[in-house]
Amino acid sequence: MDQNEAPLLDALAEYHRLDRYGFTPPGHRQGRGTDPRILEVMGLDSFRSDVLSTAGVDDRQSSGEYLSKAEELMAEAVGADKAFFSTCGSSLSVKASILAVTKGSGDLLIGRDAHKSVVAGIILSGLQPRWIRPRWDRDLHIAHPPSPEEVEKMWQRYPDAAAALITSPTPYGTCADIEKIAEICHSRGKPLIIDEAWGAHLPFHDRLPTWAMDAGADICVVSVHKMGMGLEQGSIYHLQGNLVDPVRLSQCADLLSTTSANVMIYAAIDGWRRQMVQQGQGLLEKALTLTDSLRSDIDALDGLHVLGPELIKDEASHDFDPLHVLIDLGELGISGYQAADWLRANCRIDVGLNDHRRIEATLSQSDDEETSERLLAGLRQLIDAAPQMPKPSKVQLPEPEDLEMETVVLPRDAFFGPVENVPAEEAAGRIAAEQITPYPPGVPAVLPGERINAAVVDYLRSGSAAGMVLPDPADPSVKTIRVVAHHRDE
C-alpha cells in the first residue's frame, strides 16, 4: 500500500473543496448556526470539519471505503494483521476485546494493576476475574506489570480461562516481558491482550520498549491521544494471528461504540499514521534526546529526583519508556497533590500522574527546548515555594498484600445487586459494590465484589484528605462506602 496516502484526511479536504452541504446532522451545519461566543473560543474550523462520516465525507453506502483503507494502511504500517479505529477511546477498545475473546462468560486472567476501563468490561460482561499479582515495589509503592512466572502460575491454577490481559506500559512507563508472556499463553492456545494505551508511539523507534505486536500479542489496544498526535478519544485496537475472530471483535466493538463517530478523530489518526511512517524515527529521536537532557536537568535540581534505574531493577520492570518523567518530591517535604495544584495555579503548567510524593510529566514529539525550559522554570519556582507550603497531610500507605483483596462475589453481581451505604469505619469485612479509583493513574484500589480491608479504607480516606482525586465512588470523600447488602459471606 502507499503509505503516503491519508484517505480519510484527503476525503475531508475533498468535502471542503467541493463545498458540500448536508441537510443532516450535525445541526450546526459546519458552524453556520454556532453561537459566535463559542466560535471565538473554539474556532470555526473545529465545526467545519465536524461532518458526518457516511452521507457526508463518504456516501450513504460508504463506497469510498475511506475508513477501511485508513485502517488497512495503519495495520500495514505497524505490522498487524488488522487495525480498527475507535472514537470512544481505549476504554471501549478494551471492553470490545474482552467480550470478543471470552464470548461473555467464564474466567479471564488480568493483571491487578489494570485500568478501570478493564474492570468496567468485567462488570458489563459478568466475567470472573482471576487477578495476576503485579510486581510490587514496596519502597516506591508502585505496581509494575506481572512477571511471566506469575502469569504461568495463574494459568496452572485456572487452565480454562479464556485469555490473559496485561497492562504495558503502565502509567509510569514500565513494561512487561510481553514476548515470554505471549509464549506462555500461546502454548495453551490462549490469546494475550495487551492494554498498551500508553504505547501508540512504540512501533516507530527502536530505542523505545518492544511493540506488543512484535512481541507476539494477539490484540493490542493503543490510545493515539496519549503518546501519539491524535485527538482525545482516538484509539486503535490491533489484531494478529488466528486465536481471535476478527469479525467477532469488530461486532463486539459495534455493540459498544457510537453510531455517530467523529470524523475529525478518524482523520487525525489517519494523518498521524502517515506522519509517523514518513518522519516518526526522526521525530522520536529528537524527543528522546530532549528527554534525556531534561531528565538530567531536573535530577540536578535541589530536592528533586527523576526516577530511572529504580524502575527497571531486578524484579521490577522488564523495560521502560523514558518519555515518562517521574519526579520524586520527597526531599522537598511536599506531596505530589500539592505540587500539581501549585504548578497549575502559579505557573499555568499541568502535570499528569500525581500521588503522595511524585508528579509525572510525559513528553512527546511535540515538545522542544521551549517547553522543556518552561517545565524546568516551573520546577525551580516550586522548589523556592515549597518551604512556605503547609506540611502535607499524611497518606496511610498500605502494604502490597493489603491491596490484593479477595474477590468473593462476581463484580457484575456486586455492582448491580442490592447495595447499602455504610460508614467507612464499618466497611472492613464488607463486600464492595463500587469501584474506588485514585485518578490518575486510574487503577482501582477497590473493585466491586472484593472484601474490603481496613488498610485500604485508611489509605483511601487519608488519601482523599491529602488531595487524592477519587472520581468514581458515590462518596468521593470516602466517609461512606457503597457495599453489597446482606451477603451470606459477611
Image: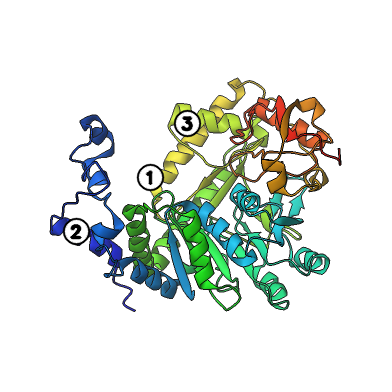
**Residue position marked by numbered label 1 in the rendering:** 370
Q: Check if mark 3's residue and mark 1's residue have beta carbons within 8 Å.
A: no
Mark in the foreground, 3 or 2: 2
Q: Taking 140 as reference, is 243 above or below it?
A: below
| Residue 393, horizontal then vertical, whole percent | 69, 25
Farthest residue to the left: give it. 18
Q: Residues within 10 Å of mark 1 (few under 14, many from 20)?
A: few
| Residue 247, horizontal then vertical, whole percent | 50, 71
Name the secondary structure under disc 3. helix
Left or right of 370 in this view: 172 = right
* Amino acid under disc 3: Arg
Q: Residue at x 27, y 61 (%)?
A: 9
Q: Distance between the residues labelled 3 and 1?
A: 18 Å
| Residue 346, horizontal then vertical, whole percent | 46, 27
Say which of 338 and 461 sits in front.
461
Q: Which residue is drawn at 69% across and 28% down?
A: 478
| Residue 108, horizontal then vertical, whole percent | 70, 61
**Residue position marked by numbered label 2 in the rendering:** 15
Q: How many marks?
A: 3
* Amino acid under disc 2: Tyr
* Amino acid under disc 1: Glu
Left or right of 7 in this view: 101 = right
- Viewer can see residue 427: yes
Mark 3 or mark 1: name the one nearer the start of the chain. Answer: 3
Left or right of 278 in this view: 478 = right
Say which of 378 and 30 sits in front.
30
Q: Distance between the residues labelled 1 and 2?
A: 37 Å
**Residue position marked by numbered label 3 in the rendering:** 344
Q: Which mark is residue 296?
A: none
Left or right of 387 in this view: 87 = left
